[in-house]
Image (cartoon, grey):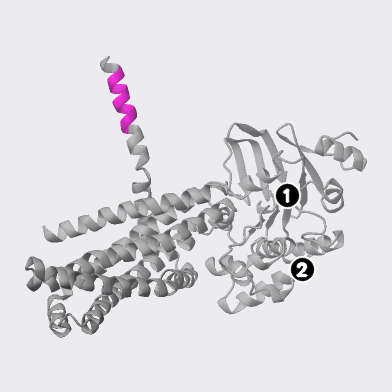
Amino acid sequence: MPGVLTDRVDRLGRWALGRVAWLPASAGLLLAALVDLGWGHVPARRVMLRQARRQVLFTGVQALPMVTTISVMLGCTLILESLPTVPRVGAETMLSTIWVHVVVREIGPLLAGLIVTGRTGGAVAADLGCMKAGGEVEALRAMAIDPVALLVVPRVVGITAATVALTVYLVLLTMLAGIAAALVAPWITGDVLVYSLLNALDLTDLAIALLKGLTFGLVISAIACHRGLEVSRAITEVPVAVGATVVRCIIVIVFVNALLTLLWLV
Amino acid sequence: MSGARPALSFDRVTLDLGPQAVFRQASLTVATGETVAVVGAVGKGKSSVIRLACGAAAAASGTVQVLGIDPREQLESVAGRLGVLFQAHALLATMTVRENLALPLTYHQLVPPDRVDAAVTDALGVAGLDPSELDNRPAVLSGGERRRAALARAWLTGWELLLLDDLLRGREFDDVAAFRAFQARAQARCPAAIVLTTQDVTLAAEIADRIVAVVDHELVELDRTLPLGELSAMALGIPA
């Protein structure tokens, strides 16, 4: 009987480890990409840079209309919702601090990470999955070209740079939209709010937002590239890879976000 | 001594793809300057010869040597000497034809940066593709044009050994004369071996020095003096 129990626990343990094997594998791929970036094949850098620029264009620049809309709506909604409500619970003096903490440290970076996950994470997994199924990765190896250097490094660089930029853009635009809404809303004394908001915002808040943007960019690019390259030669695996990438990115981003906040508070 | 070294050699190679046996103790030697056609019915393992030779597949046992190296371990040392045309063209979809062709040259610094464009244009001419396609992405090319672009890429790096998978009359080369011109140019720049796979036994008989068939998981050289019907029967397992 104890033998059966041990066997079951053993199998459960193996199953659980198998379910999260992608986590260290993605981290390993990220590490390999960063090593390649720092000490890799020098002639490949020009090609890498060109690919990274394309990634920034797709992940960052082309996402601007969507991020702008979301930021403006979010800023207006948050301020219009909170301003009439907060005084009722006697927390008006804390409003600016709460607002800055929520928008700059939490919602802004998290939302930017989720937008990049949805727009880019899945697309990168699909792109690399199709390349794997179509034999393009194999062709690179046959030409003695390192797929990590050519395919993973530019995506890691491009996605991370774009995520940081989008985080800053989203945070600042949300703040500005909130301030603008407060100024035009007739039932709020907007100028007081603007002053206290700017007072509450300090560089630490922006540094936390930047750190989160950087971490989310690295996480999304590593998970998406790893899952895309996991596809074998069957094109039917590609949509599965896209779904898995989005789910994995969301889980890790939410977890990392909480962890970073916790680390800062401790 | 280096002149005697074969461009490609399989020594008692065994290859399995999943549960399916592809080769059992298969051997093949291709000398420098030779053109060898591998023929066989669909799914018998013609492309596996190419995949083994470029390191994309690993033999379960036996030895594969390409230009004197193990392609699974030291492929970088033969960069610029080995060119591969894959069955699926395998051009990078996010790059233009120009970028695809320039990639191995730039990555391995095979030619000076100011000569890359000229080399790419020249290769396009060799493969019979219109230079106006250079700035197009592979997605807008026809199937035949993609194959020719991929052939141009193989040409750029295949100075000593060209591996051409799944040649078809009229697709990569308009006719046998076009292939012969390609062959002559390859030999003129550097004595090169060409290993090609095709299902078209007639084409193989017209262009290859030797014909090897995949029969019963082995690589068997066919007697070229046999009538074409008999060659086809042996290669494809159909009645003569």
Residue B128 disc label? 2
Amino acid type of the residue tagged 1 in the rendering: Ala
| Res. B31 mark | 1
Residue at (36% x, 70% y) in the render: A161
Where is residue A39? Give x, y as percent.
Answer: 38, 64
- From mark 1 to mark 2, how far is it between C-alphas? 27 Å
Residue A220: where, in percent of width, then height? 37, 59
SS for tag 2?
Answer: loop
Closer-to-camera residue (B1/A190): A190
Q: Taking B221 as reference, is B70 left or right?
A: left
Numbered badge on residue B57: none
Question: Looking at the image, can residue B226 be seen?
Answer: no
Residue A177 in the image, given as x and y percentages of width and height = 27, 78
Mark 1 vs 2, N-terminal side: 1
Q: Which residues are magenta?
A: A4-13
Spot occupied by residue A75 in the image (x, y as percentages of width and height): 27, 73
Quarter in which the C terminus of chain B is drawn:
top right
Q: Amino acid at mark 2?
A: Gly
